[in-house]
Amino acid sequence: MIVIGLAMILMAVELAKEFRAVHKPRIEGDQGMGEEKENRPRGNQAKFFVTLAWIAGLAVMLWLFGLVIVLPLFTFLYIKMQGEKWLWAISLSLVMLAVVYVGFGLLLHLQLYEGLLFQ
């Protein structure tokens, strides 16, 4: 959980930097690019809050339900929300389940966080 917490903090810092980034004003000879640069901060703001919501949701779900349930579920939901096909989302979720449960739980004998509701 410490590594996940640090990764989320670093990700939030980078997103904040991108959100606050100062963009160069439109140059006269730069046709077509000025509109994109003018709209970019609004797009960055939306992406920032969507990403922040995904991270917060992941953190709360991990705290409540644990790693084995949440990581495959999060993988599935994120991939489906990106518009990918069902087969791809289910396949990657099963791979995540195998990595977490079989790889870390069974092979490495690590005690996986079970979540607040299952303790």
Image: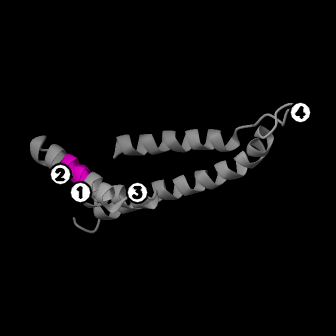
Task: Identify residue for label 1.
Answer: 68
Judge left or right: residue 15 versus residue 79.
Answer: right
Residue 95 included in the magenta stretch of the image:
yes
Task: Identify residue for label 4.
Answer: 28
Task: Identify residue for label 2.
Answer: 101
Residue segment shown in magenta: 94-101
- 84, 70: nearer the viewer: 84
The quarter of the displayed image where residue 79 is located: bottom left
Residue 69 visible in the picture: yes
Task: Identify residue for label 3.
Answer: 84
Q: Secondary structure at mark 4?
A: loop
Residue 78 included in the magenta stretch of the image:
no
Sequence-wise, the earlier of marks 2 and 1 is 1
Give the Cα separation between the discs numbered 2 and 1.
Answer: 6 Å
Kindly report which numbered mark, 4 or 2, lies closer to the viewer in this rendering: 4
Count residues near mark 3 (Cα–Cα under 10 Å), then give few for <14, some for 14-19, many for 20+: few
